Image: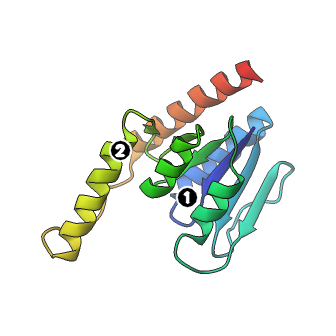
Amino acid sequence: MTIWIDADACPVPVREMVLRAGQRTATALVFVANSPLPVPRRALVKTVQVAQGFDVADNYISQHAVINDLVITQDIPLAAEIVEKGITALNPRGELYTEANIRQRLAMRNLSEELRSMGQISGGPNKFGDKEKQNFANALDRWLQKAKKTT
C-alpha cells in the first residue's frame, strides 16, 4: 500500500498532512514531480523527479500505482486513468474520484478548459482554505483506516 502524490501542483498543507499521516501510520509515500521538492528524508518517503514535459509525472504515477494504493491529484485526466484501473484517487480538497463521478468531473474540466481558451471564463479554483484542509484530512484518515483494515 502506497500513497502517490502528484506533487507539482499539490498544495503545501496537503503535502504536510500526507507526510504526518504517512509517518503516523507507517505508510509508504511517493512524491512525484518534475522539479525538486522540499520533502524531508524519512523512511518510507520517496521523491521521484521526472523529466520536464506535459503529463510526465502523471504518466509515471499511472504506470506505477497499483490496486490498494491511493493517488492524490487534482489532475482530473490522471484521476480518470487511476479510477479506471480500480485504484483510489483523492483530490487535495478531500473529494474522492469514483466511477460514479469521474466522467462528470472530466466533462466539466473539458468544458471549463474550452471556455477559458475562448476567453469566456478566467481564473482557477476557489481559495484553498481551512475547510478544504479539513475535508482533505478527514478523507485521508478515512482511506487510511479502511486500507489498514484490509491489509
In the picture as drawn, the residue positioned furthest to the top comes out as: 149
Q: Quadrant of residue 36?
A: bottom right
Q: Secondary structure at mark 2?
A: helix
Real-space Cα distance between discs 2 and 1? 28 Å
The coloring applied to the image is rainbow
Classify 10 Å Cα crowding around label 1: few (below 14), some (14-19), many (20 and above). few
Q: How many marks?
A: 2
Q: Looking at the image, which is closer to me, 99 or 53?
A: 99
Q: Residue furthest front?
A: 84
Residue 130 placement: quadrant: top left
- Residue 112: x percent and y percent? 24, 61
Q: What type is the residue that disc 2 sits on?
A: Arg
Label 1 residue SS: helix
Residue in front for this viewpoint, 20 or 96: 96
Counting other residues with Cα less than 10 Å from the Cα at mark 2, is it few (<14), some (14-19), or many (20 or more)?
some
Is residue 113 shown left or right of residue 76?
Answer: left
Where does residue 142 sit, x and y in percent of width and height? 57, 26
Q: Is residue 150 above or below residue 82?
A: above
Residue at image position (65%, 30%) is 144
Q: Which residue is mark 1?
A: 12
Q: Name the image quarter holding the C terminus.
A: top right
Q: Earlier in the sequence, mark 2 or mark 1?
A: 1
Q: Position of residue 23 (x, y in %)?
A: 77, 41
Give amino acid for label 1.
Val
Find disc 2 in the rendering and name its residue. Answer: 103
Residue in front for this viewpoint, 38 or 84: 84
Query: In this rendering, does residue 75 appear at all?
Result: no
Please give the name of the residue rendered at 75% of the width and 37% of the height, measured from the top-left corner: 1
